[in-house]
Image (spheres, helix red, strand yellow):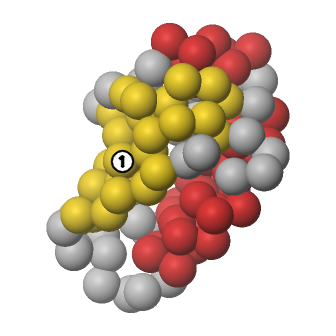
Amino acid sequence: MLEILVSGSGKACVSVHGELVMEEAPRLRNLLTALLNRGDVTAVELDLADVTFIDASGAGTLIVAHRIAANLRVDLRLSAVSAPTAQVLILMAAADLIPVL
């Protein structure tokens, strides 16, 4: 099960806990899309320290969120990336695409 916690307003922090997999990725994608489209958000920090497993769908969600954020001129960065998440992002050649704090 994936747990997602959002804090802050203009500079939001989204903490993700659990497995970011195909069944759960749409929830995160919908939340991030709504957050980015609010209009009052200038930066989003994605805290991925507690992501225990990530698949291609989860990584794709992060890549799409980064693309949407860039189009809206919102600074989206990853923080505290767990080892499993880092490995998948590296394998998908996305580690250099999404900035890490």
Identity of the residue drawn at 36% across and 40% down: 47
Q: Is residue 56 above or below residue 26?
A: above
Residue lying farthest to the front in this orientation: 1
Q: Is residue 89 above or below residue 91?
A: below
Residue type for callout 1 = Ser
- Quarter of the C terminus within the rendering: top left
Q: Position of residue 91 (x, y in %)?
A: 75, 15
| Drawn side of residue 40 relative to residue 77, left or right | left
Residue 43 placement: quadrant: bottom left
Quadrant for the N terminus, please.
top right
Q: At which x and y percent is residue 19? A: 61, 35
Q: Is residue 76 visible?
A: no
Task: Answer left or right for 93 relative to 2.
Answer: right
Few, some or many residues within 10 Å of mark 1 (<14, 14–19, 20+):
some
Judging depth in this view, the residue of 78 and 71 nearest the camera is 78
State the image coordinates of residue 35 (x, y, percent, origin top left). 44, 75
Q: Is residue 70 above or below residue 21?
A: below
Does residue 2 appear to the left or right of 49 in the view shown?
right
Q: Secondary structure at mark 1?
A: strand
Identify the residue under disc 1.
15
